[in-house]
Amino acid sequence: MASRSFLSVFFIYVSLITSLCFAEDPFVNYDFEVSYITASPLGVPQQVIAINGKFPGPGINTTTNNNVVVNVRNKLDEDLLITWAGVQQRRSSWQDGVLGTNCPIPPKWNWTYQFQVKDQIGSFFYFPSLNFQRASGGYGGFIINNRPIIPIPFATPDGDITILIGDWYTRNHTALRRTLNGGKDLGMPDGVLINGKGPYRYNTTLVPDGIDYETIDVHPGKTYRIRVHNVGVSTSLNFRIQNHNLLLAETEGSYTVQQNYTSLDIHVGQSYSFLVTMDQNASTDYYIVASARFVNESLWQRVTGVAILHYTNSKGKASGPLPDPPNDQYDKTFSMNQARSIRWNVSASGARPNPQGSFRYGSINVTDIYVLKNKPPVMINGKRRTTLSGVSFVNPGTPIRLADQYKMKGVYKLDFPSKPLTGSPRMETSIINGTYRGFMEVILQNNDTKVQSYHMNGYAFFVVGMDYGEWTENSRGTYNKWDGIARTTTQVYPGAWTAILISLDNVGVWNLRTENLDSWYLGQETYVRVVNPEANNKTELPMPDNALFCGALSKLQKPQDISLATSITSNRSKFFFTLLLMIYVISSIFR
């Protein structure tokens, strides 16, 4: 009887342990080996950054509240950081993957990211954030699905397709860096890639023979969710599918008012979800096109991405001219009006049961106002640099968040100007002192000659207004205070402004930057430091055990122990295997 009692108690104990372990939010696990490969996306062999030997890298597929674990092995010959564009690492800028916040992963090292996609849904992507590496690849899609108990505001699609578009150079990222360091512009890209492949040969003069192109297979009559991400260097692209309507449904974590577009401008760093019904006859295949915007189109004709939409019952290959881009050469407001038409679906639920519009941002008092103005590159101390409000950001040797943790002085300044400087531009590690639980208004003023995209890590913000000319106090009268879209990346047209509102509820140090790689590389960024005066693990997670050290804290870095460079889930798996083995052994003894 005693042995049976012992066995019963043991099983109850085990049941409690396992139920507690499995009751927490699920883990999804990925292993990324980042390395160079040789590829020829535009017909010219070149060095490309691959993940697990593939370019683009594998997609990450998660669900709201999942814990994401990504073990990264850096097999490049330089430092590496992966950032998760638009994925809000709630309470944990330690996992953010940008140089001002995190120490880089040295060559030949492993490092494991772990973060929770808390209260989020939508379409995002990841990419390497250092050293212009995104220009050579290393990127992939990142999907966060709704939990089953939260309905999506449209019928379940018949399939899910990710499309990564972006301008591309046949020079690798190190050569492009040298060009910028030498004080020169990058010049016109060599082409546009779609899912890492060059254009279909729609024109024998513009497109050489032998280029591999992307083909997307679909079934007639089916509706697909097509997620499109502009992962390029600096070119705005117009996306369209020949003879098919694009029903816009979501952008960067927010469901939109559903509207049909024949084409949509997608700026650098932006992501969109379209519902596309395969309602055409299958006499031929159809073109999928990504073409450059706000440039001399006749000069840039060869910088066009073309893929093929192939119906399973197609009768032949696509041929003839590409579908026309927007005819707005003399109407610079067309694209802006299109952007203004993208609205928040205030009646749809996002990651929670309550509707998106329950957050009434238009009635919240603003606590901080920043006007961030960018201009064409300038010379500072003999170097060609870009600026925000007259400040060209210099990445600190010791990351800001790490410096805070160890109470280091002099690493950065909390003096970023709320209005553009009137004096000479300067190079500094100057950041914004955000007010915890404050509500910040940021006006992005673009006084350059090309479109800039702006992104803020750790947050979605409300895009409440945009117009041409200089922003003034009176411009607030044009703000959308009800259903402005909440997103993570917004465009600012040349000679124009965009206004955004940000609820500063995510503690940490968060990068605010242009997504145009050339402008970013030359200093057009800053950080917003959000600190809870009452420090606790509820508003910010503690520094992870595997945190890397660099700069003035390099001496704290221990040599890499490869045996410990494993994902958390492998340890969890070992635990449950051991537990099951114990159950088997003990039950055998008492049989």
Image: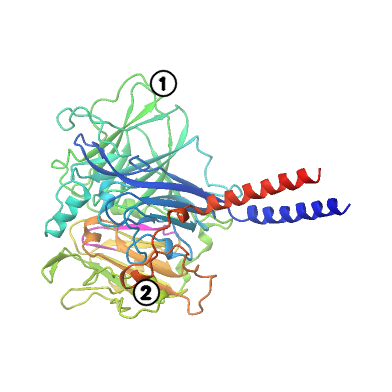
The answer to which image quadrant residue 478 occupies is: bottom left
Report the mark closest to the observer, 2 or 1: 2
The residue sitting at 32% across, 70% down in the picture is 398
Tell me if residue 391 is in the magenta stretch: no
- What is the three-letter code of the residue carrying label 2? Ala
Residue that sits furthest to the right in the current view? 1
**Would you place residue 426 above or below residue 85 in this image?**
below
- Asked if residue 451 can be seen in this view, the reply is no
Residue 575 position in % (x across, y down): 61, 52
Which image quarter: residue 6? bottom right
46 or 13, which lies in front?
13
Residue ID for mark 2: 403
Confirm whether the magenta stretch covers residue 485: yes
Residue 150 image offset from top left, x and y in percent: 58, 50
Identify the magenta region.
483-497
The relative height of residue 362 versus residue 560 in the rendered view (above or below) is below
Q: Residue at x 55, y 52 (%)?
A: 571
Residue drawn at (16%, 57%) of the image:
180
Left or right of 43 in this view: 100: right
Q: Identify the residue under disc 1.
A: 313
Q: Which amino acid lies under the numbered mark 1 shown in the image of this protein?
A: Asn
Q: At x 21% / y 67%, what residue is drawn?
A: 387
Secondary structure under tag 2 reads helix
